[in-house]
Amino acid sequence: MVVKASLFSQLLDMIPRNQFAKIVKEGGYDKNFKKFKAWDQLVSMVYCHLGQAKSLREISMGLGSIQGKIRHLGTKRAPNKSTLAHANMRRDPRSSRRPSIPS
């Protein structure tokens, strides 16, 4: 059986999850978020840029349309618009300014 990963999945696989988790833990970026973790936000924002989404609705609906495959991206469910808005407003943006993860 041949298994083909989506281009989106292959792109996310280039980010070392264990190093990303270490940076998130050290910075405390998930501290005030119970369900919507930093990885979920990263997946959403990468989707936003690749899909050229113009609104939170487009991100939410687009990720929702791949609901069966979203677990393979490392997230449990597509975020709601309000969850994305809250995370984008409240999560420390310095988490994305961290020096690049070495390969």
Image (cartoon, rainbow, N blue to C red):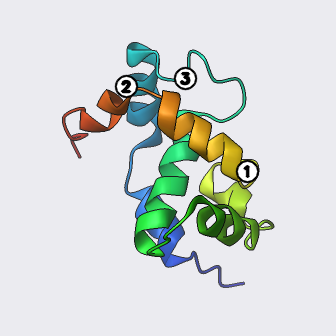
Where residue 5 sits, quadrant-wise, is bottom right
Front position among marks 3 and 1: 1
Which residue occupies the foreground of this view, 89 or 71? 89
User: Which residue is denoted by mark 3 in the rendering?
Assistant: 30
Mark toward the viewer: 2 or 3: 3
Report the amino acid beneath label 3: Asp
Return the disc, 1 or 2, that comes first in the chain's sequence: 2
Give me the C-alpha separation between circle 3 and circle 1: 18 Å
Where does label 2 land, which residue? Answer: 23
Identify the residue at horizontal 46%, vertical 15% (top origin). Answer: 28
Q: Image point 60% across, 36% down: which residue?
A: 86
Q: Nearer the viewer, mark 1 or mark 2?
A: 1
Which of the two discs, 2 and 3, labels the residue nearer the N terminus? Answer: 2
What number is the disc on residue 80? 1
Within 10 Å of the Cα at label 1, are there few (<14), some (14-19), or many (20+) other Cα atoms? some
Residue closest to the eye, 47 or 12: 47
